Amino acid sequence: MQKKSNRWFIWLFVVVAVVALFGFSFGSIFDSIISSRPSPSPTVPTPGTTPTPPAVSETEKKNLQDLENGYLQILEKEPDNSDALLGLAEARSQMIKIGLKTEKDLIKPLEKLVELNPEQTQYKVLLAQTLQKTGQRESAAQTYRSILATQPGNMDALQGFVNLLVEQQRPSAATDLLQTTLKNAPQANQVKPNSINESAVRLLLGQVYVTQKQLDQALEVYDKLIASDPNDFRPVFAKAILLREQGKIKEAGILFNTAEKLAPGQYKDQIKAAAQEEPASAPPSSNSQPPSSSNPQPSPDSAPIPTE
């Protein structure tokens, strides 16, 4: 039963990650910053477990350690060298994936990058994700707020902050944030066109409802999105997963097929994989109490998600 429940939450957050066709993923944001040196795609661990580091040779480990030491030597002489700081952060992110470092080792270089490059929002997002993952939730929240104060439609920051609030058992604060964002969207988009992706924000709102088992509200959000744009595969995919987990297999199957037909090629395999999953026990009705703090939440590097 626990395995089925875990699978249910994995797919919920897969859909969350599809929200704006952005990946809320440490590696994916790093890849966008360092496009010439892509990182391996992250995998999906079972919530509540620690992913097993991939097997690497001693030579590969030594190469990463030498690379880290090289950047550290540069920074001893040039502590404000942004290229060296970014290289150090990237090297350590690779070392984290194979178990040689922890996320705490990323905080100092990311903080320095934010200080030196306040206009680079990606660094702030990476810092907030890292603070959140290391348990420094209030610092993470402050960082997310600082981003959203000037970029209220930044989906990486918005999604990260919403996940943090849900993780803290503050779903009302998460829905308030999203509803306020939607309320301010028309004016913001008039000042700066397309600065807030309203469909993406509504999808994220739907997923907050799902995590709180407010299923009627979630379905209402998805239905409105489907009606407003029948060619958008994302709300169709989200609704299909929700119906399937409620045991409505036939209706879900039709929607999975529709989502697959509508989706760009890079997302079709993900939709097929979701459609082939066996349904878990149907979640309680929308009148049920919110889930306890033991419910797994997504980590910044845990979902196999689209990045463009």
Image (tube, rainbow, N blue to C red):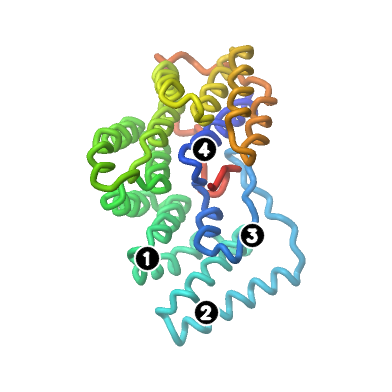
Judging depth in this view, the residue of 99 and 109 nearest the camera is: 109
**Mark 2 vs mark 4, CA separation in Å:** 37 Å
Judged left or right of residue 169, residue 280 is right
**Mark 2 vs mark 1, CA separation in Å:** 18 Å
Q: Marks 2 and 4: which is nearer the front?
A: 4
Q: Quadrant of residue 5?
A: top right
Where 191 sits versus 220, above or below? below
Q: Earlier in the sequence, mark 2 or mark 1?
A: 2
Where 231 sits versus 106, above or below? above
Return the residue at label 1. 114
Q: Marks 3 and 4: which is nearer the front?
A: 4
Is there any visible trace of residue 291 in the rendered image?
no
Q: Which mark is residue 99?
A: 3
Q: Which mark is residue 72?
A: 2
Q: Residue 220 carries which label?
A: none
* Badge 3: residue crowd in 10 Å (few <14, some 14–19, many ≥20): some
Q: Residue at position x 42%, y 16% from top?
A: 216
Q: Tell me, yes or no, whether the two marked residues, 2 and 4, touch with CB atoms within 8 Å.
A: no
Residue 89: x %, y % from top left: 51, 67
Q: Tell me, yes or no, whether the two marked residues, 4 and 1, touch with CB atoms within 8 Å.
A: no
What kind of residue is marked 1? Val
Q: Residue at position x 36%, y 72% from top?
A: 116
Q: Marks 2 and 1: which is nearer the front?
A: 1
SS state under label 3: loop
Return the residue at label 4. 18
Q: Which of marks 2 and 3 is nearer the N terminus?
A: 2
What kind of residue is marked 4? Val
Q: Earlier in the sequence, mark 4 or mark 1?
A: 4
What kind of residue is marked 2? Leu
Where 127 sits versus 275, above or below? below
* Badge 1: residue crowd in 10 Å (few <14, some 14–19, many ≥20): many
